[in-house]
Image (tube, coloured by chain):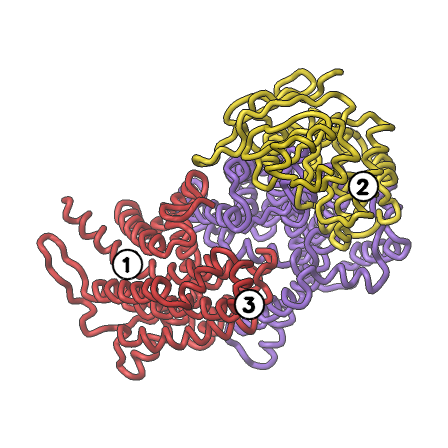
Amino acid sequence: MWSIYLNVAVQGVLTGLVYGLMALGLSVIFGVVRVVNFAHGEFAVVAMYGAYVLFTAFRLDPLWAVLPLAAVFFFFGYALQAALINPFVGRPEHEQFILLVGVGIILVNVLLISFGPDARPVNLSYGFDSYEIGPLLIDKPRVFAAAAAIAVAAALFWFFGRTRTGAAIRACADNLVGAAVVGLNVKRLYALTFGLGLACVGAAGALLVTIADAAPSLGPAYTLIAFIIVIIGGMGSMAGALVGGVLIGVSEALAGFLFAPSMKSMFSFALLIAVLVLRPQGLMGQRL
Amino acid sequence: MIELWRSVSPRGRIVIALALAALLALPLAADRYVLSVLTLIFYFAYVGQAWNLMMGYAGQLSLGHALYVGVGGYVAALMWLKLGIGPWLGVFAAVAVVSAFGAVIGWLGFRFGIAGVYFALLTIAFAEFTRIGFDHLELTGGAAGLFLPFEEKRMGEWWNLRGGQLLFYYLALALASGAVLLVALMARSRLGYRWRAVREDETAARALGIDAFAVKMAAVIISSAMTAVGGVFYAFYYNNLFPSQVFEISRSIELILAPIVGGLGTVFGPVIGAFVLTPLGEALSAVTTRLGINAPGVKAVFYGLILIVIISAMPNGIWPRLAALFGLKGRPP
Amino acid sequence: MMVLLAAANLSKRFAGLVAVDQVSFAVAAGEIFAVIGPNGAGKTTLFAMIAGALAPDDGTVTFAGARIDGLTPDAVCRRGIARTFQIVRPFPALSVEDNVVIGALLRRADMPSARAHARAVLEMLDLADKRGAIASSLTLPDRKRLEVARALATDPKLLLLDEVMAGLRPTETDRMVAILKRLNRDTGMTILLIEHVMRAVMALASRVLVLHHGATIAQGAPEAVVRDPAVIASYLGVEAAS
């Protein structure tokens, strides 16, 4: 009996790692640039469609699409921040929110116009294969996706931990005035950060399409999941985004299994409320 | 009240009087479609005004106001369907239940110091939780929804909100006008000033003896109660309620657009915003159909573009600019 | 001398650092009392404990005979203590007059009397001509006077001024000193101020408390305190004494 739960939980962990990668992008954006990116999920869905298109046109496995999509999204993010979003840094939250809602609406509806409302699956040749490890039966796509998510996250950790630019960005997050005073080009660093954040989203989208069908309606749902994960995991903590992702992945999988698939998000929202009230800095964040 | 009228500039008084007269007389000349669009405008002006109280004056960002519309609508609808109690009484129950929801959310947020984006996410969480909950609630018909049946013999019972377009037109007009009056009075009141103090700088406000918690609770309770009435209107106007429609986040976003575009923290902002956005939406639909572009989504793309343009160019909204342009600014109390 | 405010053995620690160390003093009704000392001496922390922004770890604060330590900032204000902030906090989008009206609303039941009182206070603080201006458009000296006006509008028995002279030029400092002196003389307002600007301290204070590393190193009449060797060594330097 317990092996079923274990399977569901493992499923949740793997899915959660991909969610975590998506949320990592938000953690970077919200944590550094402090912009309420309410189009985050919509960007992820665009990436899903991107991978879908590359797959149907070129037979490119989404796992290979991760790099090109991440690169494209990086440039897109950089440009978007520099051109449109930068004036909104420091403006009241509701203004940022409306701006990004507008962006999100455009993204979702362009997808709707281009692809229609129906879900588009990516039918991998190994889509139904699975690994057997003892009592566990784990689908291959999920394993690959999770592994790729960890790899991308590791690359990001390396960047922030080991490079000068990464340190500069962390400086901006910690102390904006100080950063400017020591001569860091804050505008450029913000654009870079937004680019990196969206690159994560691009990568995550490519991976998501291997475990879920692409549909425009997923946008808002993914945005909310990303925010829930970032808050539960802890603002400003990159590891927290992954941990939070896993937690949400597992809880949604279990809730969906124990109650009904349509109820799985309820638990996540309840968890969000609990975290906001009891421990707003999240599991791994610094005290607000 | 006389003081309020006196504080409006002479030009402003003429504009208000003319506008009201025109709107009251309009059904004589306009067709059903125009009346339905105006009814929608008044509805958005009304709920937008309710949200404006909480955000524009008290500075608390709620992105889950659809919760209050939905619960208000469901309570009144259930009382009608299951208990045969009409909305003229049901509205009180709706207000009571919704205010309780608002009070809980407010208490959790303000007591535990959840502010800004985090508070907004708290409100979203409650709305989403309720949406999914209602989807699975048998009492309310679950995901299949709740329907108010059309009863020929009841048409004309205006107190039960059983009637045609005309009934709802005047009701919506009354609600919107009432809301404007209420906000105008509240803005000049001691509570209104305290709200603005808390909005501008809560720490400084507390240092002046203002009980910020009480003031914020008042904002969320009044705002949610007002919105509940909008929900009752919604339920009896559309005669159906689906959790996935009524509670969803796009509804919450939809109802904040008018006050933001029109002008947050102003008395007429939500009204102007509604008068701009709703016809705009309709016009876009008309234009896209005319051009033969039948893709759903084209209208939304333009809508998104307009949002971005307005928030970039006129973040304080259209009304302050308009008022200054036409010399319509009033005097403070 | 009737004691209006008494602090007894006030202490505050922040994760191992002792910010305020067993500080005791009493402020008599109608007097102007100054707290001075180098940066980091604990003056603002002391202030925060009196104003209710921080709860003391040790010690008590008594105001008009009743304990007020641990009360919230708004409760403290309602008891009759009004404070200004070191970095001024006007309500930026509101007019100068509306800023002060909000202060006046504490004790005035209706808008007209609150507005009338606000105007009177603005008159006292030389801000009457700017009452229609939006607070965010004001210069620093005007903002400082607005801050004082707003606090004053709450009809306090004790005014807590946190470095109200900081950033002011000598002429503006003199202007503020004159206003505070007039206020104290005409209304008997008790004032407790933190100050770095010795010029103002010497002109206003009847008694001075000197803090260093969170502890009292001298207390008494200004002339005596500025000659105290410990005070000179830790804060003032030899020139200030002469």
Provide the residue designation for mark 2: C176
Are circles 2 and 1 on residues that touch, CB within 8 Å? no
Residue under disc 3 on the same chain as residue under disc 1: yes
Q: Name the quadrant containing residue B310.
A: bottom right
Give the distance between the C-alpha atoms of the residues marked 3 and 1, in whole angstroms: 31 Å
**In the rendered picture, chain A carries what hue?**
red
Provide the residue designation for mark 3: A85
Kind of residue at badge 2? Met
Kind of residue at badge 1? Thr
* Label ID, residue B121: none
- Towards the viewer: A210 or A166: A166
Provide the residue designation for mark 1: A15
Nearest to viewer (mark 2 / mark 3): 2
Residue under disc 2 on the same chain as residue under disc 3: no
Task: Kindly give the residue lying farthest to the bottom in the view shown.
Answer: A58
Kind of residue at badge 3? Ile
The purple one among the chains is: B
**In the rendered picture, chain C carries what hue?**
yellow
Disc 1 crowd, CA 10 A, few/some/many (<14, 14-19, 20+): many
- Left or right: where does residue C180 sit relative to residue C70? right
Nearest to viewer (mark 3 / mark 1): 3
Q: Name the quadrant containing residue C28.
A: top right
For the point 87% across and 44% down, the residue is C128
Task: Kindly give the residue lying farthest to the left in the view shown.
Answer: A134
Residue under disc 2 on the same chain as residue under disc 1: no
Say if residue A277 shows up in the picture.
yes
- Left or right: where does residue A15 sit relative to residue B30? left
- Write down the chain letter for disc 1: A
Which is nearer the N-term, disc 3 or disc 1? 1
Q: Is residue B330 above or below residue A116?
A: above
* Label 1: which secondary element: helix
